[in-house]
Image (cartoon, rainbow, N blue to C red):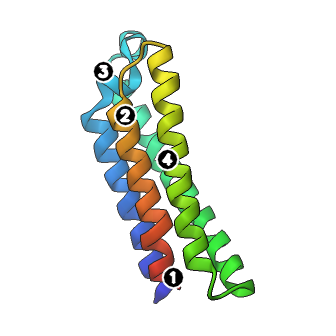
Amino acid sequence: MKVLIAALVILAIACLTGVIIYTRIEPVAGAEDIAAKGLTETRRLFTFAFSAAAIIFGAVVALVFVLIHGRWPTAAQPLIFWAGVGLTVLFSIGAAVVRSSEGAGGIPECVALNALWGLGYGWLLPLVIG
C-alpha cells in the first residue's frame, strides 16, 4: 500500500510540475526556443521533459530513502528532509544567479519547481514511505 501511495505522490508532483511548465512556458523556455520550434511544440517538449524528470527524480529519492531507512531508521526522515531543504535553497540560488547572468527570465518558476520538488520529495514522500 505504501508503494502505491508513494507512486501517487510522485505522479502528483510530476503533474504539478507539468502544469507549472505548461502554463508558464514563455519565461522558462525563452524566446529562442519558442521561435525555433513554435509555442505548441516547445510547450509539449518542455512539459514532457520536466514531468519525466520529476518521475525519475522521485523514484531515485524513494529508493535512496528506503536504503537509508534500512540502515538508519530513525535518521532517514530528517536526513532526507534536510537534504531536500538544502538542495532547494542551493538550486534556487543557482537558478537565480545563472538565469539572471544570462538575461533569462523564469526565476520564479524555477524557485516554485524547486520548492515543489523539495517539499514533495524531501518531506511528503518520506512521510508516506516511512
Mark 2 — residue? Answer: 44
Q: Residue 89 — which label?
A: 4
Please provide percent x and percent y for residue 89: 49, 47
For marks 2 and 3, the one nearer the N-term is 3
Marks 4 and 1 close (CB-CB < 8 Å): no
Residue in the foreground of this view, choosing between 65 and 38:
65
Residue carrying label 3: 39
Lower sequence index among marks 3 and 4: 3
| Residue name at image x 62 percent, y 79 percent | 76
Residue at 63% x, 63% y is 60
N-terminal of the two: label 1 or label 3? 3
Q: CA distance from mark 1 to mark 3?
A: 39 Å
Identify residue type, mark 3.
Leu
> Which one is earlier in the sequence, the residue at label 4 or at label 1?
4
- Measured along the vertical axis of the image, is residue 35 above or below residue 105? above
Corner quadrant of residue 26:
top left
- Kindly state the secondary structure of the residue where label 4 is placed: helix
**Side (left or right) of 39 relative to 7:** left
Q: Sort mark 3 into few (<14), some (14-19) or many (20+) by Cα contacts within 10 Å.
A: some
Q: Nearer the viewer, mark 1 or mark 3?
A: 1
Q: Is residue 122 left or right of residue 27?
A: right
**Which amino acid, by three-letter code, is at mark 2?**
Arg
Q: Which residue is mark 1?
A: 129
User: In what element is the residue under mark 1?
Assistant: helix
Marks 2,3: beta carbons within 8 A: no
Residue type indicated by callout 1: Ile
Which residue is rendered at x = 34% and y = 55% of the image? 15
